[in-house]
Image (spheres, coloured by chain):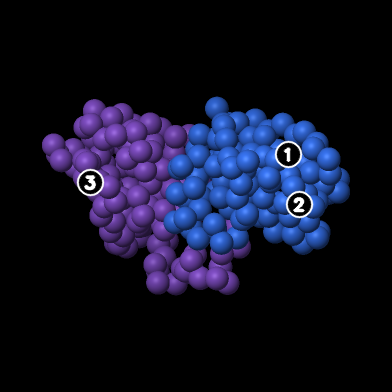
Amino acid sequence: MSVKLTTRQVGDVTVLDAVGRITLGEGASTFRDTVRELASAGHKKMLLNLAEVSYIDSSGIGEMVSGFTTIANQGGSMKLLNLTKRVKDLLQITKLYTVFEVFDDEAAAIRSFS
Amino acid sequence: MDLDLESTLESVDLAEETVLREAQELGFDEDDQHRIGMSVRECMVNAVVHGNCYNARKKVHVTVSRAPDRLAVTITDEGEGFDLNSLPDPLANENLLRHSGRGLLLIQAFMDEFQMRAREPKGTEVKMVKYVGKSS
């Protein structure tokens, strides 16, 4: 299974709910295209919910970083919500926990954008 | 077990699935199976994408060997090879936002042993080992 992405709007924050795998190939390219489309449509506050993501490889991490910089370059921000232990471990190993703001509570994450 | 695989992304999945079956039979727990599977995936991607550049005439050779306490996987491509020391440090602050370059870092974090060497006349060989019950 590749990744399935759905968006919902909470105030001015776009929550991107991801389900499945973000790995090299269809998963990573679907993720990249979706984030780029949202960014070009003016969505500058993005919360990526990874609760249902079972697998991210280094290509998926690369697309998350690219999404982060794309949105940051437009004056916005991308934050992460509900990481599994495996994804937390990846962020620790790659030092990306110093880059991304990470939340376990959606309401708190939404408030942090204001 | 020896596999000669095409330089395709389907081969990445096939190698990962094959090694995962071996890891499961050896008794690795789910977290270690995930670490092994991801290490094989990262190594296969390097071989297919960066080593063999998807060249249909080039193969990726995968060898899986088991002992009661360990699983060893060797993955060899037929590419031009590269100097490990020439790669940017993915943990340097100036490289944290780079799109790529984290695969080898993850393999070394997840596996207990990791060796990479150039093959003659060309190609790169990666050997990685994971011990049962020993977290890396």
Q: Are marks 2 and 1 in contact (CB under 8 Å)?
A: no
Q: Position of residue A96 (x, y in %)?
A: 54, 58
Q: CA distance from mark 3 to mark 2?
A: 42 Å
Query: What secondary structure is found at the residue carrying circle 3?
Result: loop
Gap between marks 3 and 1, in whole Å? Answer: 39 Å
Chain ID at mark 2: A
| Position in image of residue A16 (x %, y %) | 70, 38
Give amino acid for label 1.
Answer: Val
Instruction: Name the residue carrying label 1.
Output: A15
**Which residue in the protein does label 3 denote?**
B134
Numbered badge on residue B112 = none
Indicate the secondary structure of the residue bearing disc 2.
loop
Q: Is residue A34 left or right of residue B98?
A: right
Chain A hue? blue
The chain coloured purple is B
Q: Mark 1 packing: few (<14 Cα in 10 Å), some, or many (20+)?
A: many
Residue A12 vs residue B71: left or right? right
Q: Nearer the viewer, residue B30 or B125?
A: B30
Q: Residue at x 45, y 42 (%)?
A: A86
The chain ID associated with circle 1 is A
Could you say which is closer to the camera, residue B20 or residue A77? A77
Q: Position of residue A5 (x, y in %)?
A: 68, 33
Residue B106 shown left or right of residue B92 in the figure:
left
Circle 1 — which element?
strand
Kind of residue indicated by mark 3: Lys
Please say whether residue A80 is visible from this viewpoint.
Answer: yes
Check disc 2 and give the amino acid type.
Phe
Q: Which residue is mark 2?
A: A113
Asked if the residues shown at circle 3 and circle 1 are in contact, with their CB atoms under 8 angstroms apart, the answer is no
